Structure formats: structure tokens, C-alpha cells
Amino acid sequence: MSSFLNAPVLLGRGPVPEVEIDAAEAAVGVQFSRDYRDFVGRYGGAVVGSLPIFGLRRAEVMADEGYSVVDATARFRADGWEPTARWAVISMDLGGNRIGLTSAGEIWISDHDAGETTKIAATFEDFVVHLLDT
């Protein structure tokens, strides 16, 4: 993930202390995987490839609102967007589909057009690597 250091505009304003990550985890009610916790702790949030990774800090290229995993998760849950009740919403693709992290550490996408959810990565790290490779 050292490639992020070459593009600071894509990074959040990390680092984020563990206590703040713990509070975010409690707020969304989803256990964050170690790799996601490490990412948020180091970078705060970021844009990886073409997608935002919601964390607890805003990268300069992100909107002023909606960059927080806590805020994004709360917003989509309030809208009744299933299955975000069981996810921490960590990203959104260019089509507006929500991407979530489960307590098992898996990454899923909810396709609002097709009305289905699909596992897209076994781990957060796999998801980030995929975004970097595309």
C-alpha cells in the first residue's frame, strides 16, 4: 500500500487512533477485520482505483459528507437498504451500489438494479489489491 504515499490527495487525514476505530466499530455494530482496521488506522480513508474507501478521515478528493464508514452505514440503513443492516458500508461503486464489510471480514456488493448481493472478495486486503490491479 506504499503506492498511496505517492498520491497524498487520495489519502485521508490519518492516522486514526485505535480508540476511535473501536468507537466506529461499536457504532455500526459490525466487527471490523484486522486488515480494514489497519487501513483506517494508517490512512483514515482513501480513494483506491476509482472507488472511495470510507473510513474515519476524508481524502481531499472525497465529498465533505458521506466519507465516514459510520455515516455511510447509518444513511443506507435509514433508507432501509438491505443487507446493510449486517454490513459496515465501506464503499460505493460508480453505479451507486453499496459495498460492505461483514463481521466475517468478507466484502459484498449490493446491486440495486439486479436486486441481489454478491461476495466480491474474501478479505478487505483482497478487495484493495483488486482495485489497485484494475
Image: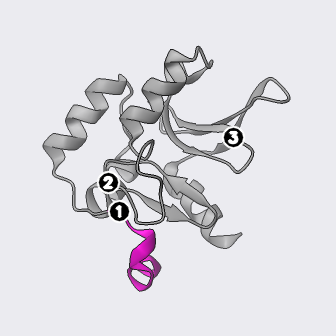
Asked if the residue under mark 1 is in contact with the one under mark 2, i.e. CB atoms within 8 Å, the reply is: yes
Q: Amino acid at mark 2?
A: Arg
Q: Amino acid at mark 3?
A: Gly
Residue beneath disc 3: 96
Of residue 18 and residue 65, the one placed in the foreground of this image is: 65
Most frequent secondary structure within the magenta stretch: helix
Q: Is residue 11 magenta?
A: yes
Query: Can you say which quadrant of the picture contains the N terminus?
Result: bottom left
Q: Is residue 39 magenta?
A: no
Return the x and y of residue 9 as percentages of the image width and height: 42, 74
Residue beneath disc 1: 12
Residue 74, picture quadrant: top left
Q: Residue at x 53, y 55 (%)?
A: 52
User: Is residue 43 in view?
Assistant: yes
Image height of 74 relative to 101, above or below: above
Query: Of helix, strand and loop, which one carries label 3?
Result: loop
Of residue 112 and residue 123, the one placed in the foreground of this image is: 112
**Which residues fall within the magenta stretch?**
1-12
User: Is residue 1 in view?
Assistant: no
Q: Amino acid at mark 1?
A: Gly
